[in-house]
């Protein structure tokens, strides 16, 4: 028995170490990290090194706990500002989108696999959710700086669509296991009622649990080393409590992390670092266990149908679901196309595919194997094309800020303050004389090995080390003051424009000087207001507005989303590649309006009126 403990520990830790080292390869070559973890698990399993692991209950238990840890960390790191910016379209994708994907994929699975209708929809529910870990690792590893709206939508969708897929999967497994053939209307009613109950209970317990976590951390004077473990344990308690009363534990733990991460919780920096490490460990363990559980020798029998279904999911089911969900939000076609492509399937899909085995379904192993191959197909094809597609669609923007040299130090005995150590880098705003805000308290400056009070140092210089006391929920403004401007290479100069213009000047001046195409009612607007109006009130860094002969580019916005710097390009950039599908509601409306606007031109009764109408319409389009 003692030797068995040593052997299991040796093998388990060796696999984790191998997975950790493989991340270096993934960062170097931009490979999907999940694919490497699964590969290590497959290579170590029964058809590889010979490690036999065929316990579906243990695999599901380990995967569920690991997923709860990952979801809590995902919620903890999601700011309310990001949620406000892209919350509605992302939540639509995470709920309605999952349902549409399940239905479309289930229809294809019925005709390709020979499963029953319910089994086909079960397979669709298992692969309907996206994997946040795989998506955002690829964005980080490939150094892809996406437009903020796109990144936020993907982040929120990936963090919130798992509970819906889990509910659909477990419900369908239970129905199939009972052997009943429910009426379609009755089944739909049961699904809707059950979903509403689970989501309400999960949301209520998650929000309450998040507030309790914050209150307990504030009231209990725990040791600094024990505090992160205490918070993680409370998050798992929220997950278990919600599931025990019939709610969605996964939704509850995500919302608990969202509440805690956006509250004035003590030692937030320490908690973030700890949870980042635990999230990595949970991902590694979950992926290795799921890889060990698979049996590659069973794949050839269903390989062709699984590959076809994987391609159908990537090129039909997911794009149709995304397009239908995003129609009301007037999201540009390039962004919609990218969001539909970055729907990588991952560990959650494999985990859900285990539930048919737990329910003792006749085709449970076949469903698991097909889902596993679909995940591998998604990671191989989509995983290696995320970066090139983002560049092709013009969704990558230059970095706004350059290097930032900062160290965060938590103060013992301080509930809501930290000590930040900044090194002044050349070209940063503070190096150019900009003042540090009043809410920050500079206490010490080290220059050339000598330490002095901040008040005695005069103007800060490049190379100075500044120690500042700030609230632990300090605004990002302080980082912006100490970061240099990003180096703009030759390829990005055209992106930012030849020079800047004063955003407070009237837009009519652009028409007078550059011949810009501006409507009569827009001439009295400021340049900033003109851009905001053209973008329908949603402005972010790197947005571009074409005015005929010139383009205006948003170079920077402040903390409240107001434009503070505008670039002007006298050589308008070529339009991004045309995406023939994914029309938004605005484009559909405009096409219908143009269609009916052309009809009077064909009327023989008013032949002379047609040119004037056409000219006016072209002027307005311009």
Image (tube, rainbow, N blue to C red):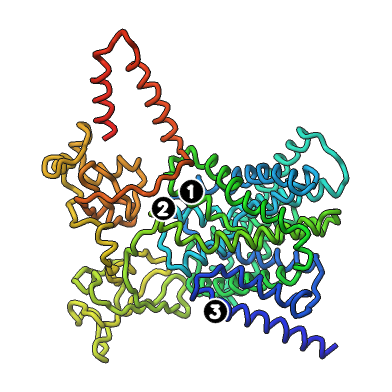
Give the farthest residue toward the left: 513
Earlier residue among tags 3 and 2: 3
Residue placed at 29% from the left, 68% from the top? 486
Earlier residue among tags 1 and 2: 1
Q: Is residue 138 left or right of residue 437?
A: right
Say whether residue 178 is visible: yes
Q: Is residue 13 left or right of residue 328?
A: right
**CA neighbours of label 3 inside 10 A, class few (<14), some (14 to 19), many (20+):** some
Tag 1–tag 3 contact (CB < 8 Å)? no
**Of the numbered discs in the image, which one, if any, rests on residue 224?**
3
Residue placed at 26% from the left, 82% from the top? 464
In percent of width and height, residue 49 lies at: 75, 80
Question: What residue does disc 1 label?
Answer: 337
Viewer-closest of 318 and 82: 318
Alpha-carbon span between mark 1 and mark 3? 46 Å
Say whether residue 147 is visible: no
Tag 1–tag 2 contact (CB < 8 Å)? yes
In percent of width and height, residue 43 lies at: 70, 76
Question: What residue does disc 2 label?
Answer: 393
Residue placed at 41% from the left, 30% from the top? 591
**CA neighbours of label 2 inside 10 A, class few (<14), some (14 to 19), many (20+):** some
Vertical arrangement, residue 556 with respect to residue 337, above or below: below
Give the farthest residue toward the top: 605
């Amino acid at each position: 028995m003692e030797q068995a403990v040593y052997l299991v520990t040796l093998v388990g830790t060796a696999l984790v170490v191998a997975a950790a080292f493989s991340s270096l390869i993934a960062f170097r070559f931009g490979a999907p990290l999940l694919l490497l973890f699964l590969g290590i698990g497959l290579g170590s399993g029964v058809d590889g090194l010979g490690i036999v692991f065929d316990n579906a209950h243990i695999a599901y238990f380990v995967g569920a706990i690991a997923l709860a840890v990952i979801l809590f960390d995902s919620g903890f790191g999601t700011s309310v500002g990001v949620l406000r910016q892209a919350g509605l379209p992302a939540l639509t994708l995470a709920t309605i989108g999952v349902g549409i994907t399940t239905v479309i994929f289930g229809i294809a699975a019925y005709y390709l696999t020979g499963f029953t209708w319910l089994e086909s929809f079960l397979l669709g529910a298992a692969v309907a959710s996206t994997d946040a870990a795989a998506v955002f690792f690829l964005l980080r590893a490939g150094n892809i700086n996406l437009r903020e709206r796109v990144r936020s939508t993907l982040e929120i969708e990936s963090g919130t669509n798992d509970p819906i897929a889990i509910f659909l999967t477990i419900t369908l497994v239970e129905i199939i296991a009972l052997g009943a053939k429910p009426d379609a209307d009755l089944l739909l009613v049961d699904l809707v009622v059950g979903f509403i109950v689970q989501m309400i209970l999960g949301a209520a317990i998650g929000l309450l649990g998040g507030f309790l976590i914050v209150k307990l951390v504030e009231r209990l004077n725990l040791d600094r080393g024990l505090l992160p473990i205490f918070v993680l344990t409370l998050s798992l308690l929220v997950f278990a409590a919600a599931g025990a009363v019939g709610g969605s534990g996964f939704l509850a733990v995500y919302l608990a992390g969202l509440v805690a991460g956006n509250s004035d919780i003590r030692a937030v920096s320490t908690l973030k670092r700890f949870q980042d490490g635990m999230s990595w460990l949970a991902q590694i363990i979950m992926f290795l266990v799921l890889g060990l559980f698979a049996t590659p020798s069973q794949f050839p029998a269903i390989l062709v149908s699984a590959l076809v279904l994987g391609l159908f999911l990537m090129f039909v089911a997911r794009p149709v679901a995304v397009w239908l969900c995003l129609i009301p939000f007037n999201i540009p076609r390039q962004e919609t196309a990218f969001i539909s492509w970055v729907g990588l399937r991952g560990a959650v899909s494999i985990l859900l595919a285990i539930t048919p085995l737990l329910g003792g379904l006749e085709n449970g192993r076949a469903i698991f194997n097909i889902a596993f191959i679909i995940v591998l197909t998604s990671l191989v094809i989509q995983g290696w094309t995320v970066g090139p597609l983002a560049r092709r669609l013009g969704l990558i923007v230059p970095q706004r800020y350059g290097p930032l040299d900062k160290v965060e130090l938590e103060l013992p005995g301080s509930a809501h303050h930290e000590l930040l150590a900044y090194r002044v880098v050349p070209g940063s705003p503070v190096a150019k004389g900009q003042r540090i805000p009043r809410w920050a308290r500079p206490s010490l400056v080290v220059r050339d090995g000598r330490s002095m009070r901040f008040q005695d140092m005069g103007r800060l210089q490049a190379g100075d080390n500044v120690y500042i006391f700030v609230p632990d929920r300090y605004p990002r403004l302080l980082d912006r003051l100490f970061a240099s401007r990003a180096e703009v290479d030759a390829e990005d100069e055209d992106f930012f424009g030849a020079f800047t213009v004063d955003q407070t000047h009237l837009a009519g001046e652009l028409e007078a000087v550059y011949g810009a195409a501006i409507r009569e009612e827009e001439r009295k607007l400021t340049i900033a207001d003109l851009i905001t109006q053209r973008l329908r009130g949603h402005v972010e860094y790197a947005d571009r507005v074409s005015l005929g002969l010139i383009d205006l580019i948003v170079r920077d916005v402040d903390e409240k989303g107001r434009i503070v710097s505008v670039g002007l390009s006298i050589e308008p950039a070529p339009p991004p590649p045309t995406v023939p599908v994914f029309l938004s509601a605005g484009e559909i409306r405009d096409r219908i309006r143009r269609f009916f606007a052309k009809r009077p031109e064909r009327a023989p009764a008013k032949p002379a009126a047609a040119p004037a109408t056409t000219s006016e319409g072209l002027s307005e389009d311009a």
